[in-house]
């Protein structure tokens, strides 16, 4: 089914009126025939197997039994009124009970006859029982028809739907009707050579078998075909978007490397670049020479050296006569970048300015002016950078830190900042799994820095329970004696703010007692204190005047203190994996051995245990991101919620990564030879862009 019937409102289906159409829409989001067809069963029940009554146990799911009715009676009154029947096979006796539809059962269930019974077994007073089983007269036509049905679909339904007799069985009926009426219109939507090459089940067969499988193998084949279709079309749309974009937007050409880059490389770069950094720089270099706008995602773990790569790319832009900027999501992060860049380029080399909401009007005016006349080459700031009044003379490259808080819309606002849109380099703060990146940022090219600078000692992570707090104090004292500094971080989660603050204050008191003045000095920073005070405390810690920093997660994106060698995280079980990893990344920035101590209560949830074990086991952000994805599912990873991109019906980015890669590759190959999708064998693909049910809606992506 493509195009028309797919879009037909569901109320035109036999058996669905206005009222049912309304609940289907409200409860399941099913508006069209296509939606209904894609309301897939979440499991199937095996109807090939018949149980003997003696084997029926109440922990079994649905079972089928052939048995003869030996007795039938109506018991109780009003609320307790029920029909109870006794059935028997050659192995035992079982009781059936109905509380509803008694009249109908009374009429259709006849004592002395044998039936195929189907239901969820239970027990009552130690006897096998089934309430509200389905029943078909044994040997009847209906029973035979169902006998052919080997795997019965189970659909999700709701209380509300059940009031409209749209329980799983009711929905099943609708789907049967739908397939009877429209099956012939479910036409192939993948190129035939792809279907053949990957031995995919034909599309119509796949839909039918996913609902009503002929057998378990067919079900697996059907599911595979539909997953393939879903992921393939998703990638087709994402990459098509990219192809269109490439055709539409020219890009500034950086065809030379000049004095700024060379001077920096020869005299200012304080270390040797890692191979990964060199490779990524080369990728960016190639991108920016082609005359096509670059949209590149730079992934790399905390501390992998993304900033230097960004800076060096910017220097190339400047060498070619362009201006550049770095956009960060918060003021703290912006000013941190500003400090870093300034210290890297040194004095008198190139002008760098910081523009945030708190820059005074007078200074702001000067910055605006220098941007317009082209004097200012590097601007660093927050959203303030893309306000309409900020006009650049010739903006050539934009670096965005922490993409997920910006979104595609802001990115496109940037494209309009010059006649030829500037190249865009997006840096992620925390790595996300490659498959997720390919979907969320499908229109971006991805570069990965998968190597840390040499000489870094991996951070040692331990997990301690409350009972080992003395060990923690011991380690703290040792490190302070060596001249190191320490962070202690408390959770601050909105709903329990008061309690969290109390925890932090109690913790602070304990620490103060254990680490008394004048030998020890402690800073405290949390959300509620005034900005100046926060800044003052931070600065004291940065200068090494205090040895311990007690804080909430505000320091997550805080300052860089290479002398800090211990990160202690209290109530670590309450943090998410990516946040734990971010926090840990605050240490291990110097040459010394660093530690991360995860403190937790004794009793942990299964997920909590996996999170803490993962942190102890690995320092690799990509590995951690992968585990995070598995624990929480793609919908809960930061930045994915609003995207709507992960609204997948059959496939799952957690488990279908290989298939996703395969589909991506397939689609890339197609665009490489036929970017317009003009070849006859690719015509079928153009339908995907008109058909909402063929994948995702277009406006969510572009
Ligand atoms: P990221 O932004 O990826 O977390 P940074 O760019 O802030 O990482 O780099 C972390 C630290 O490592 C900085 O102090 C930086 O100067 C340093 N650094 C970056 N690249 C190298 C390198 N190749 N060798 C040694 N140190 C490096
Ligand atoms: Mg950084």
Image (cartoon, rainbow, N blue to C red):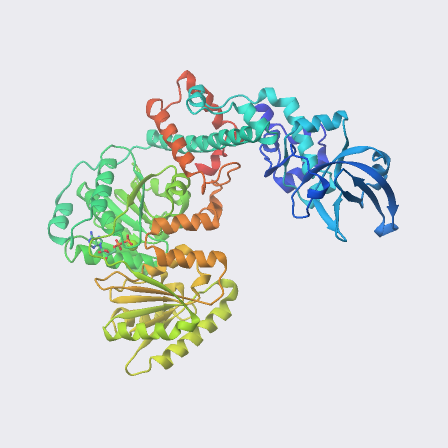
For the N terminus, the quadrant is top right
Residue 643 visible, this orientation:
yes
Total number of numbered discs in the rendering:
0
Q: Position of residue 96 (x, y in %)?
A: 78, 43
Q: Position of residue 636 (x, y in %)?
A: 48, 49
Residue 142 position (above or below residue 585) = above
Q: Which quarter of the picture shows residue 279?
A: top left
Q: Which quarter of the picture shows residue 133?
A: top right
Q: Position of residue 681 (x, y in %)?
A: 42, 18
Q: Which quarter of the picture shows residue 492?
A: bottom left
The quadrant of the rendered image in which ligand 2 is seen is bottom left
Front-lying residue, 8 or 435: 435
Relative to residue 490, is residue 420 drawn left or right?
A: left
Front-lying residue, 338 or 578: 578
Relative to residue 440, is residue 395 drawn left or right?
A: left
Name the residue at 47% across, 69% down: 500
Name the residue at 50% across, 59% down: 605
Residue 504 position (above or below residue 170) = below
Residue 578 position (above or below residue 136) = below
Residue 356 position (above or below residue 399) = below
Farthest residue, direction front:
90
Q: Position of residue 383 (x, y in %)?
A: 37, 52
Name the residue at 24% across, 37% down: 288
For the C terminus, the quadrant is top left
Farthest residue, direction top:
680
Residue 357 visible, this orientation:
no
Relative to residue 314, is residue 691 drawn left or right?
A: right
């Amino acid at each position: 089914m493509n195009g028309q019937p797919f879009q037909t409102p569901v109320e035109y289906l036999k058996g669905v009126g206005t009222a049912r159409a309304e609940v289907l829409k409200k409860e399941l989001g099913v508006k069209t025939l296509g939606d209904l067809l894609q309301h897939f069963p979440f499991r199937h029940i095996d109807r090939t197997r018949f149980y003997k009554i003696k084997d029926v146990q109440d922990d079994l799911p649905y079972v089928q039994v052939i048995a003869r009715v030996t007795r039938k009676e109506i018991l109780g009154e009003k609320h307790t009124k029920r029909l109870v029947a006794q059935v028997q096979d050659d192995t035992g006796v079982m009781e059936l009970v109905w509380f509803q539809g008694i009249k109908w059962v009374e009429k259709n269930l006849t004592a002395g006859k044998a039936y195929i019974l189907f239901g969820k077994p239970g027990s009552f007073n130690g006897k096998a029982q089934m309430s509200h089983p389905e029943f078909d007269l044994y040997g009847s036509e209906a029973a035979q028809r169902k006998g052919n049905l080997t795997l019965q679909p189970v659909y999700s339904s709701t209380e509300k739907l059940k009031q409209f007799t749209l329980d799983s069985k009711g929905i099943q009926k609708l789907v049967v009707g739908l397939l009877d009426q429209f099956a012939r219109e479910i036409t192939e939507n993948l190129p035939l050579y792809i279907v053949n090459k990957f031995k995919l089940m034909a599309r119509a067969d796949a839909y039918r078998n996913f609902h009503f499988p002929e057998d378990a193998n067919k079900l697996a084949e059907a599911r595979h075909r539909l997953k393939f279709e879903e992921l393939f079309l998703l990638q087709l749309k994402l990459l098509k978007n990219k192809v269109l974009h490439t055709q539409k937007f020219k890009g500034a050409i950086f065809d030379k490397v000049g004095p700024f880059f060379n001077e920096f490389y020869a005299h200012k770069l304080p270390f040797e670049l890692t191979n990964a950094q060199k490779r990524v720089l080369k990728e960016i270099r190639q991108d920016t020479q082609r005359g096509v706008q670059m949209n590149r995602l730079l992934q790399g773990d905390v501390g992998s050296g993304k900033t230097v790569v960004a800076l060096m790319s910017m220097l190339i832009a400047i060498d070619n006569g362009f201006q550049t900027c770095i956009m960060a999501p918060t003021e703290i992060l912006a000013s941190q970048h500003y400090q870093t860049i300034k210290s890297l380029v040194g004095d008198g080399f190139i002008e760098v300015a910081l523009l945030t909401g708190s820059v005074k009007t007078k200074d702001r005016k000067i910055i605006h002016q220098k941007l317009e006349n082209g004097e200012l080459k590097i601007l660093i700031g927050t959203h303030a950078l893309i306000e309409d009044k900020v006009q650049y003379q010739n903006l050539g490259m934009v670096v965005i830190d922490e993409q997920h808080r910006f979104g595609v819309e802001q990115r496109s606002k940037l494209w309009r900042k010059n006649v030829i849109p500037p190249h865009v380099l997006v840096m992620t703060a925390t790595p996300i799994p490659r498959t997720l990146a390919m979907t969320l940022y499908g229109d971006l090219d991805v570069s990965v820095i998968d190597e840390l600078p040499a000489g870094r000692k991996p951070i040692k992570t331990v997990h301690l329970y409350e009972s080992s707090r003395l060990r923690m104090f011991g380690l703290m004292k040792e490190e302070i004696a060596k001249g190191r500094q320490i962070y202690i971080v408390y959770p601050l989660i909105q709903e329990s703010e008061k309690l969290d603050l109390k925890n932090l204050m109690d913790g602070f008191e304990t620490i103060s007692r254990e680490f008394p003045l004048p030998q020890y000095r402690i800073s405290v920073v949390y959300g509620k204190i005034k900005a100046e005070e926060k800044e003052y405390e931070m600065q004291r810690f940065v200068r090494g005047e205090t040895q311990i920093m007690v804080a909430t997660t505000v320091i997550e994106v805080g300052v860089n203190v290479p002398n800090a060698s211990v990160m202690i995280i209290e109530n670590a079980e309450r943090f998410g994996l990516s946040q734990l990893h971010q926090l840990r990344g605050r240490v291990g920035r110097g040459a010394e051995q660093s530690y991360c101590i995860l403190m937790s209560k004794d009793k942990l949830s299964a997920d909590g245990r996996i999170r803490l074990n993962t942190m102890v086991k690995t320092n690799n952000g990509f590995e951690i991101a992968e585990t995070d994805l598995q624990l929480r599912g793609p919908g809960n990873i930061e930045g994915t919620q609003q995207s709507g991109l992960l609204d997948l019906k059959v496939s799952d980015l957690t488990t279908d990564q290989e298939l996703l890669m395969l589909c991506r590759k397939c689609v890339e190959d197609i665009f490489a030879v036929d970017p317009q999708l003009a070849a006859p064998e690719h015509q079928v693909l153009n339908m995907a862009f008109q058909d909402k049910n063929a994948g995702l809606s277009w406006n969510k992506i572009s």
